[in-house]
Image: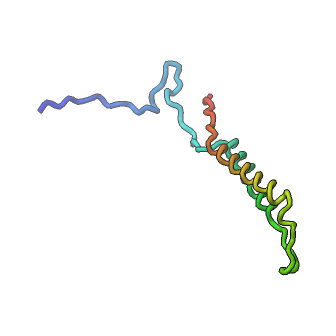
Amino acid sequence: MDIKKKKPVAPVAAATASKGKPLVAEKKADFAFSKQNYMLMLIGLVLIVLGFILMIGGNSNDPKVFSDAIFNFQRLTLAPILIIAGYVVEVFAIMLKTKVQPEE
């Protein structure tokens, strides 16, 4: 049995370039989303909540009397558009790739 002994390898973080700077910089905590992603998610959430709030109402004080207030523009058109727009913004915010900034 011929076993070749290898030289011990120095840790990568300890290796330095010719100018004295480390070859491998210490990594900061990398998050999946940036501040821009979270802001877009918040905007999407606000649009969704606003759409559902606009959909509320249209009831009648007397249950025997029908109210035409449920068929207005706000409840049938505007609210669903806001909800769908909110979901589109949410998907865009999740799919938006964050740009990696070089470390100094």
Q: Residue furthest left?
A: 1
Q: Choose top left, top right, bottom left or bottom right for residue 68.
A: bottom right
Q: Relative to residue 66, is residue 91 depicted above or below?
A: above
Q: Quadrant of the N terminus?
A: top left
Total marks drawn? 0
Q: Relative to residue 48, is residue 36 depicted above or below?
A: above
Nearer-the-camera pick, 26 or 29: 29
Q: Is residue 62 left or right of residue 9?
A: right
Nearer-the-camera pick, 34 or 75: 75
Q: Relative to residue 45, is residue 30 depicted above or below?
A: above
Nearer-the-camera pick, 25 or 38: 38
Q: Quadrant of the C terminus?
A: top right
Look at 80% across and 55% down and name the residue there. 77
Q: How far across and down, in percent of the image, does residue 102 sit?
A: 61, 29
Q: Is residue 50 left or right of residue 89?
A: right
Q: Choose top left, top right, bottom left or bottom right for residue 60.
A: bottom right
- Give the image's coloring scheme: rainbow
Q: How far across and down, in percent of the image, does residue 15 sit?
A: 45, 27
Look at 48% across and 25% down and name the residue there. 16
Q: Relative to residue 23, is residue 48 depicted above or below?
A: below
Look at 83% across and 63% down and name the residue there. 71
Nearer-the-camera pick, 64 or 35: 64
Q: How far across and down, in percent of the image, does residue 12 sit?
A: 43, 31
Look at 69% across and 47% down and name the residue there. 88
Q: Choose top left, top right, bottom left or bottom right for residue 66.
A: bottom right
